[in-house]
Amino acid sequence: IDWATYKRLIPVAGLVDSFQKQYEALTVPYPKDTVSPQVDAEIKDSQAEISAYKKASEQRIQNYQKEIAHLKSLLPYEQ
């Protein structure tokens, strides 16, 4: 807040000084963060699940590619 500008523009003596003192004395209590550790633990667990799923998916992809290669190696149905 530009207090000097307000002091220059407001003609009532001491009003801006009073507001400035009240503003600077004001403290807003913020709640203590108690949830972040739980969220971090859930993220860590999720990362482990995601890694396992990706590994299993890669294995399935390899199996499907082998199956596709086998099907392509067979004679066409018309023959």
Image: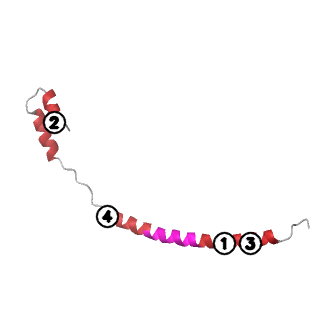
Q: Nearer the viewer, mark 2 or mark 3?
A: 3
The amino acid type, in three-letter code, at marker 2 is Trp
**Mark-to-mark CA distance, 2 and 4:** 37 Å
- Magenta residues: mostly which secondary structure? helix
The mark nearer the N terminus, 2 or 4, is 2
Q: Pointer 1: what residue?
A: 62
**Mark-to-mark CA distance, 2 and 1:** 69 Å
Quarter of the N terminus within the rendering = top left
* 24 w.r.t. 2: above or below: below
Q: Which disc, if any, is residue 67?
A: 3
The mark nearer the N terminus, 4 or 3, is 4
Q: Nearer the viewer, mark 1 or mark 4?
A: 1
Report the side of 17 relative to 63 (left or right). left
Q: Position of residue 32 (x, y in %)?
A: 27, 60
Q: Residue at x 38, y 67 (%)?
A: 38
Q: Position of residue 29 (x, y in %)?
A: 22, 54
Q: Which disc, if any, is residue 34?
A: 4
Residue at the outermost left position: 13
The amino acid type, in three-letter code, at marker 1 is Gln
Q: Residue at x 13, y 29 (%)?
A: 8
Q: Which disc, if any, is residue 49?
A: none
The mark nearer the N terminus, 1 or 4, is 4
Is residue 41 covered in magenta? no
The mark nearer the N terminus, 2 or 1, is 2
Report the side of 2 relative to 75 (left or right). left
Which element is circle 1 on? helix
Q: Which residues are magenta?
A: 44-55
Q: Pointer 2: what residue?
A: 3
**Mark-to-mark CA distance, 3 and 1:** 9 Å
Answer whether labels 2 and 4 touch (C-beta < 8 Å). Answer: no
